[in-house]
Image (tube, rainbow, N blue to C red):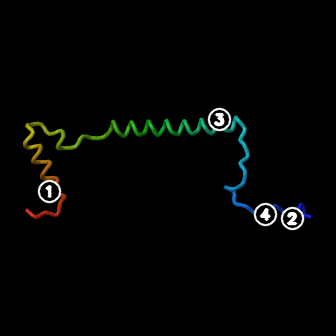
Amino acid sequence: MAAAYPPPWEPIWKRPRTPKPKAEKKRELRKQRRRLQDAGRRRLAAGESRRPRAWQGRIGNAAPRRDAHALSRLRHSTAWL
């Protein structure tokens, strides 16, 4: 009698997993590896193309560089001069 009823509904994450064929698994892994390698290349390119900050590339002694750094920090603060 129980076989006549459809199986009780259960959410998809509770159903037992059906194993994938080996070829499909390898294909997914290939795609994933490719995606990760592309992301790594993009990250490397982004790091290499970054422009130097203005106060780092300043030519001269360290005192004006320190002053410029302090002034820029002051500029972004709420302190009154």
Name the residue tied to disc 4: 8
Mark 4 residue type? Pro
Q: How many marks?
A: 4
Mark 3 residue type? Lys
- State the separation of the CA atoms marked 1 and 2: 75 Å
Rendered position, 61 above or below 70:
above
Indicate which label's residue lies in the foreground, 2 or 3.
Answer: 2
Name the residue tied to disc 2: 5
- State the separation of the CA atoms marked 2 and 3: 39 Å
The residue located at (69%, 57%) in the rendering is 12
Name the residue tied to disc 1: 74
Of residue 70 and residue 6, the one placed in the foreground of this image is: 6
Query: Residue 13 occupies which quadrant of the picture?
Result: bottom right
The residue located at (54%, 36%) in the rendering is 34
The residue located at (43%, 39%) in the rendering is 42
Q: Mark 1 or mark 4, which is nearer the start of the sequence?
A: 4
Mark 1 residue type? Leu
**Label 3 secondary element:** helix
Image coords of residue 33 (percent x, y): 55, 36
Name the residue tied to disc 3: 26
Q: Is residue 17 left or right of residue 2?
A: left
Is the residue marked by circle 4 packed among few (<14), some (14-19), or many (20+) residues within 10 Å? few
- State the separation of the CA atoms marked 4 and 3: 34 Å
- Residue situated furthest right in the rendering: 1
Q: Mark 3 or mark 2, which is nearer the start of the sequence?
A: 2
